[in-house]
Image: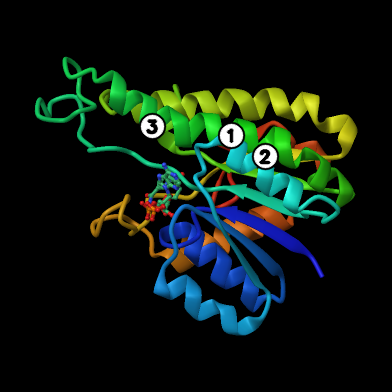
Amino acid sequence: MSNVLITGSNRGLGLGLARSYLEDGWNVIAVNRSQSSELDALSATGRLHCHTCDLTDDDALSQLAHELSGNSVEVLINNAGMMAKSGFVRDQESVQGFGHFNRQVWRQVFDINLFTPMRMAELFAPHLEAAGQGKLVTISSMLGSMELNTRGGLYAYRASKAGVNAIVKSMGFDLAERNITAIALHPGWVRTDMGGKGADLDIETSVNGMKHVIDGLTTADSGKFFSYDGSEMPW
Ligand code: NAP
């Protein structure tokens, strides 16, 4: 039976991915800093393995990787992320608008959106390698694309996702000889706590699309940036 490890699977897209992989018969390793009744309800499958830890604590992540040593991970999804208070360039009240730099906010956003995916990749490369054709999927965003930035604003979030795109590009080269396919994946604009009620997509549509992309990945895709609909995204 295949194993998928998903960070931030207590709500939003991560919860949707966990539910869908369980429906498909996978073992789901859920790594979260907090639990939820929605995730708990999926325990009845007997294939949900929950680990609660601080995802920004390197020692806690090392301990988790050690606990899971000897297990293969066919798919690792770096999903947990935060935007901080949103707002575009004209929103002068936003903590992410120009003129409102806040080092503490930037540290929080970079910690979970960029540093954790990097550390998870290093720690779980052996588990992905053990799978034979491991897939390392990092949920990025079109907001991290330079080419698609037509509005400005959202400085910390955009920079963190551009950073995560950069590490995925490098891992595309560095992990190739270990047969690990590393990609960045844009989920679309989705109705979650982060995306808001006015977003384009429901969780199911995004999750189905992302899973289809992940299913079809080959080593030739490593180092690429995809959208949930399978199209390739510009960096
Ligand atoms: P969400 O509903 O806000 O859920 C965020 C998840 O990340 C939660 O499980 C949350 O855990 C976890 N998380 C946040 N900060 C964390 C931290 N410091 N330590 C540990 N866990 C943390 O967001 P979502 O829409 O599902 O987003 C999932 C991913 O998709 C993110 O990487 C996001 O950037 C990306 N994305 C989303 C959209 C969209 O439209 N929704 C678009 C592009 C990209 P807690 O419950 O413990 O806070």
- Nearer the N terminus, badge 3 or badge 2? 2
Outermost residue toward the top in this view: 99
- Mark carried by residue 62: 2
Outermost residue toward the left in this view: 93
Q: Amino acid at mark 3?
A: Val
- Nearer the N terminus, badge 1 or badge 3? 1
Looking at the rendering, in which quadrant would you find the N terminus?
bottom right
Corner quadrant of residue 208: bottom right
Q: Amino acid at mark 2?
A: Ser
Q: Position of residue 72 (x, y in %)?
A: 82, 54
Crowd band around label 1 with a 10 angstrom C-alpha radius: few (<14), some (14–19), many (20+): some
Is 125 on the left-hand or right-hand side of 103?
right
Provide the secondary structure element on which disc 2 rests. Answer: helix
Front position in the image: 163 or 50: 50
Label 1 C-beta lies within 8 Å of the nearest ligand 1 atom: no
Label 2 C-beta lies within 8 Å of the nearest ligand 1 atom: no
In this view of the protein, can residue 217 be seen by the observer? Answer: no
Distance between the Cα atoms at labels 3 and 2? 21 Å
Distance between the Cα atoms at labels 1 and 3? 16 Å
Q: Position of residue 106 (x, y in %)?
A: 34, 24
Classify 202 as above or below 122.
Answer: below
Return the residue at label 1.
58
Corner quadrant of residue 118: top right
- Mark carried by residue 109: 3
Front position in the image: 102 or 169: 102
Q: How many marks?
A: 3
Q: Position of residue 177 (x, y in %)?
A: 89, 31
* Residue at screen point 62% across, 60% down: 211
Is 109 on the left-hand or right-hand side of 9?
left
Q: Do the numbered discs 2 and 1 sit on residues whose CB atoms are within 8 Å? A: yes
